[in-house]
Image: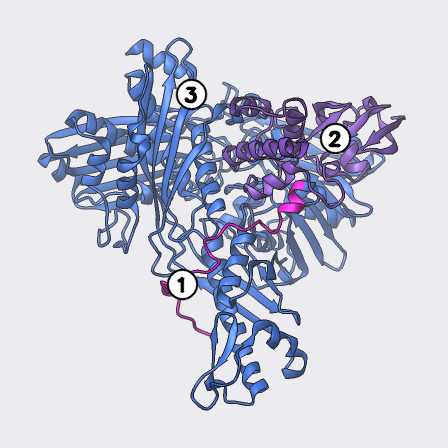
Chain colours: A purple, B blue
Amino acid sequence: MAGVHVSTTVNGDPVEYVCPADESLLDVLRDRLGLTGAKEGCGTGDCGACSITLDGQLVCSCLVLGAEAEGKKITTVEGMADGENLHPLQRQFIDNAALQCGICTPGFLVAGKALLDRNPDPSVEEIRYALAGNLCRCTGYDKIVRAVQAAAKDLQKQKK
Amino acid sequence: MQHDQSYTGQDFKVVGSRPKRPDGIDKVTGRARYGADMSAPGQLVALMLRSPHAHARIVKIDTSKAEKLAGVKAVLTAADLPDLTNGNAGDYATLENCMARDRALYDGHAVAAVAAIDKSTAKKALKLIKVTYEKLDHVTDVDEALKQGAPQIQPACDGNLGGRYEFGHGDCEAGLKEADVVIEKSFKTGQTHQGYIEPHACLATVGPDGSGELWVTTQGHFTYRNVCATLLGMDIAKLKVTSSEIGGGFGGKTHVWIEPVALALARKANRPVKMVMSREEVFKASGPTCASSMDVKIGAKKDGTITSAFIECRYSDGAFPGIWGMLGGMTAWACYDLKNCQSVGVDVLVNRPKVAAYRAPSAPMMAFGVESTLDMLAKELDMDPVQLRLKNVAREGTQSSYGPVYGPIGIEPTLEAVRDHPHMKAKLGPNQGRGMACGFWFNIGGQTCSDLNIGVDGTVNLTVGTIDVGGARASLSLIAAEELGISYDDVKTTIGDTNSLGHNDTTEGSRGTFSSGMATIFAAREAIEVMKSRAAQMWDIPIEAVSWENGHAVATGAEHGNLPPLSLKEIAAESPTTGGPIAGHHEVTADGSGVSFASHIVDVEVDPETGRTQVLRYTVVQDAGKAIHPDYVEGQFQGGAAQGIGWALNEEYIYGEDGCLQNPGFLDYRIPVCSDLPFIDTKILEIPNPNHPYGIRGVGETSIVPPLAAIGNAVSNAAGVRMDQVPMSPPRILKALEQA
């Protein structure tokens, strides 16, 4: 199969790759670009472990083709920290013990950040519905919701 | 060296605190490497061809076309995996499950595999393999499978009976004669999957010299090594298995599935082979837990004293016999002090995948039967359900239903905590109901081996062979820091590969913190002995005059008392000139694991129009023995409860008439999502295990035992009709409401 040449931006860096037309963006990120932070839990858009943003929009990268990223801006979990400074969500996930096995964590962080970017002061219910597309099997979500609440407070303080 | 493993009753300095986990940053930045995150130069991609039939004779497999496809480097069938199991039935079952031999035994059973230069070539090659099947009659229901004339799945078994195990004491028939009330009821539970988010994945390499490496997501890399080496005729020492970060297991990653096949393909192709299951494969062809069907009969006096307690539970083991009936039978009545009790666990073969452990395997089903029937009894006697349980509760000295006489145990304190919990006083609205239930799990110990090495700057490397799925490295670092008297941040804990430590049993049975904790304590004590001798040398005094206090060597006795104490760091700094590296090591078969009990409370609201159930409040009370890192103990309580909620309300394998699984994906096999659940309140009780220096019992599994029954009782109270089958999905609740 002839490859598709793609020029795109990943976590602020210009990136070029060639991929088969039917290859998912998740496979491109993981197998061609070495960004294994996004995980494949299902491959059918049901678990959210492969969550990334594409031009600011939260998507399951397993449901996007690599070829569709042409000219777009991709952000992944690898782009969340600013150098050695963790994003408040990342810090609060650690402080609140919001991860056990951690396989779903990158997806929750990306989805959680997408929520806080558009709603800086979400209610518990808004957090629960915003994260309903991300499956976690270890935590029962309790500490995840608390971590997102704490990160929202941190971000509000930062802005003041 | 022999060490005293009795509970010390000491005051802890760092154990019980909540420091940040050492693997946290890797896991929030995407750096942590799981099963599918490792690659090797020149690696091939492997895929499995699976049976589309529930039961079929494999007449012929023609791989010639696939082998000729450009880019295909190896094709494998059972013919490439000769039986090297020396008559070991368990190993043979594993071999047959990894690759079907003469028959495919369930929908999804592996029949061939391909390794190719990329995924699309491997996919094309699978389509070129021609398998000629002769379909056979199948059976997927546990009760149908036991009927006369049901299709027989394993020729060596009596019908489809895989095993029958009985436990108990006294005389149930005599006990019924003493009873004022007898309650009899049958129950069923659906088959569920552990639902770990990370599919099985590995990267395998085997050279022509017979040496190999396996990077794999597993709960037991030493066990995987032994099994793979046995099945493939390799020397155990020549197969190095590294456990990757593990994306959930819950028992499902205690057995090999794709790994021997990946190694065999790597050997045949002489190239690294990466093999990753799809989610559909995980559902169809890894190891879910059993479906079950059971009959319960309880007799009691008017005052609530149980005079007779009987349960028989039939478990669907899949296509290979397991020990699930035995485990279930042992747990059934374990919470209670009973004069006459009997439990029967029956293993039944069906055309479904080979069952694996799922968090306290077999106990949630028995608890559903027992604890639901107890609630029916409480209603009949007009007695508070907690009081009824307290009336019959097991205590220290009770002869347990499965044999041993209990030492100090926590079931009564969990019930008292439930009785006194504010949750019990929360107001309920219309269509709302409250339920509670108890649960038991054994916990285990087993073979364990740990190394502890002290660097010249006084920081410590602890290497353990149990895996970390929920904060174990943090807990074990706390234990090493406590024992050595140093700071948590001075300890770095690593999971060692199979070449770096002696054998460690699989991390199952809630054994990780109990057994590696014990090996860590004793390894630290051995390192302390070394440091005492180094201090004696530095001071030039006899070793008998040196003791160890708060991370320091202290000179004792009148003649040495003026010497200032030497810190661990000071002793470590001199180690190059006082005898070399300072290390401690311990290997042990950790005995004396402490049994664990929990009681749960749940409030639900049932929508009478749709049959949907919303969980409103949930409280877990469990005895941890000692909570080393309370955050991760609470996490185990909450996670087990959430899995139990899914099992109780939604999750179920659905098989069609054709014997094929109809819902092998997260869309149709719906596990709880964030918006389904409330915050899950936890209360940790600490009744020390007398057989562990720190009192640890193990906390991973018990939390999944009570939820099925607790929710069953809550839904029954909310709906006004007794629910006898899980999952209590909306259609089942509507049907129950219609029939009421």
Q: Badge 1 sits on which subunit? A: B
Evaluate if marks 3 and 1 touch, with contact meaning CB atoms under 8 Å apart: no
Q: CA distance from mark 2 to mark 3?
A: 34 Å
Tell me the SS state at disc 3: strand
Look at mark 3 in the image and give the residue it sits on: B614
Residue found 90% across the figure and 26% down from its top: A2
Q: CA distance from mark 3 to mark 1?
A: 43 Å
Q: Residue furthest front?
A: A160
Tell me the SS state at disc 2: helix
Q: Amino acid at mark 1?
A: Pro
Compared with B211, B578 (above or below) is: below
B551 on left or right of B391: right
Query: Does A90 appear in magenta?
Result: no
Look at mark 1 in the image and give the residue it sits on: B693
Q: Are marks 2 and 3 on the same chain?
A: no
- Dot 1 alpha-carbon crowd within 10 angstroms: few under 14, some 14 to 19, many 20 or more: many
Numbered label attached to residue A26: 2
Query: Does B2 appear in magenta?
Result: yes
Q: Amino acid at mark 2?
A: Leu
- Dot 2 alpha-carbon crowd within 10 angstroms: few under 14, some 14 to 19, many 20 or more: many
- Could you tell which of marks 3 and 1 lies nearer the N-terminus? 3
Q: Badge 2 sits on which subunit? A: A
Q: Badge 3 sits on which subunit? A: B
Tell me the SS state at disc 1: loop
Provide the residue span drawn in magenta: B1-28
Q: Quadrant for residue B187, please give it.
A: top left
- Label 2 or label 1, whichever lies nearer to me, is 1
Q: CA distance from mark 2 to mark 1?
A: 48 Å
Q: Amino acid at mark 3?
A: Gln
- Residue B311 shows in this picture: yes
